[in-house]
Every structure is written in structure tokens, then in C-alpha cells.
Image (spheres, rainbow, N blue to C red):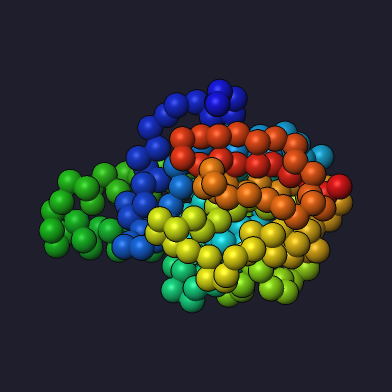
Amino acid sequence: MEYLYCKNDNFQDFASGRVLYGGKGIPNFPIRLLLEIYGRALAYSNKKDDLVIYDPCCGGGYALTILGYFHNKNIRKLYGSDIDEDMVAHAKKNLSLLTDANLKKRKEEIMELYNSYGKESHKEALDSCDKLSSMLVRYISTEIFLADCTMLLPEILPDIIITDVPYGNLVEWEQGKGSMDAMLEQLWRISHDNTVLVVCMDKKQKINFEEWKRLEKQNVGKRKFEILKKK
Ligand SMILES: C[S@@+](CC[C@H](N)C(=O)[O-])C[C@H]1O[C@@H](n2cnc3c(N)ncnc32)[C@H](O)[C@@H]1O
């Protein structure tokens, strides 16, 4: 796949565990690929500003937080949900880093670590805090909630839904077979006519629910993503 929306860059300031909170069992997503996928979804969206974004399998909120930094001025609200309480708690912590005040607190936390252990990695993380802070130009409202996305979801009418579904490396669907289509049905119900949906999945996973029309499909390494709109 040719990258159209994100050049090859060094994204180390955003590495999980550096400023953004990471940890064992917390999934994350390659940043360049995420930004490319989002760029493509945005190109299909008839709305470019004041966007409402939703990730129904948000894990630790890594992808949403990254989007909150890189597309700061065009996003109004970030919604995330996950079936796992620990993930929801983790996502809340990461999304909280989208305000200057909380980023400052995070910097103080890292400063304490640096003072105690004198590690170079902590010093670098302090510089990264400043870099992240310079990217914040507006307040983004955030809401993270506990939900099984194959069941009834609140009607949040997102403009773009972007999600990396479970595929068994680190995390499995918490429901049985057919979860993908059950999720797509729910997302269809809570979307407006122009919502753009992006699903990142394992190459072997399939979409059967037919009320979404496929706009694009790309294979990238062991993953694929599909971009869809309501029929
Ligand atoms: C691949 S991870 C998502 C990674 C996330 N995009 C990130 O940036 O960190 C998939 C997530 O789906 C969640 N999950 C599994 N079954 C679910 C369900 N039925 N409803 C909602 N979330 C589910 C898992 O708890 C896991 O956090």
C-alpha cells in the first residue's frame, strides 16, 4: 500500500509507556498506519471539522489518543468503549493526556522518576511531554465507557468510527463466533447516513453484514483494513 497521508517519520515521542501509558497486555497500533488509515477515512467523510470519532474496541485508548494529538484541531469529541474494565480505566488515563493540565501532571510524575533513577529514557520522556503539549491547540471532549460492542450501544452518531478488532494475538473477542457482524450491525444502528467506518482486522477475518458498503480494502502485512459507508 502506498502511503498518501502520512510520511515515514520518527514517532518515538508517542511510544507506548513513554508519555502515553502502556503496560503488559495493553495493545497498541503502528502510528504511521493509523494516521494513514484515518487520513483515508477523512477523505471519504463529507465532514472535515468538528468531528466526532468513536472506537468501540478502544483497548487502552492508544489509537484514540494518537488521533487526538495529530488531528487535534479538527476533532470535537472522542468516544471509546471496551468490554474490559481495566482497558476502560487505562483508556481514560491515556485520553486524559489530551489536556495541558494533565500533561503537566504526567511530566511531574516522570520528573520524579528521573530524580529517583536518573534514567536517560525518563529524560527523553520529559522532552516528549513538551512536544505533545505543543500539539494541543483545542479542548477535545472525551468519553470512555464500558460496553460490549456486539450488544446495544448508545446512539452517539459518530462521523468516523475507527477500530482495531480483536484477532487473537493479544486479545480475543469476548463473544463467540459472528462477533464481527454483530458489532457491524450495532455500529450501523448508532451511525448517521454519512458515518465512515474503518475496521482493521486480521487478513482471515471476514465481514458478512451487508448493510455497510465497502469503499476500500487494503492488505498491510498480516493485517487488512476496510473502509465502509452505509448503503
Ligand atoms: C486489538 S485491541 C484494540 C486496540 C486499540 N485500538 C488500541 O489502540 O489500543 C481489541 C480490544 O477489543 C476488546 N474487546 C473484545 N471483545 C469485545 C467486545 N465484544 N466489545 C468491545 N470490546 C471488545 C478487547 O478488550 C481489546 O481491548
The residue located at (26%, 44%) in the rendering is 124
- From the viewer's perspective, is 41 left or right of 15? right
Image coordinates for residue 114, horizontal then vertical, percent: 19, 56
Image coordinates for residue 199, horizontal then vertical, percent: 63, 49
- From the viewer's perspective, is 132 left or right of 178? left
Task: Inspect this view and state whether residue 130 appears.
Answer: no
The residue located at (53%, 65%) in the rendering is 173
Identify whether 54 is placed above or below 222: below
Q: Where, quadrant-wise, is the N terminus in this rendering?
A: top right
Could you say which is closer to the camera, residue 191 or residue 177? 177
Instruction: Give the mark count.
Output: 0
Image coordinates for residue 45, horizontal then vertical, percent: 77, 40
Could you say which is closer to the camera, residue 215 or residue 142? 215
The residue located at (55%, 34%) in the rendering is 219
- From the viewer's perspective, is 104 left or right of 84? left
Image coordinates for residue 202, horizontal then vertical, percent: 52, 47
Identify whether 88 is placed above or below 209: below
Identify whether 32 is placed above or below 84: above
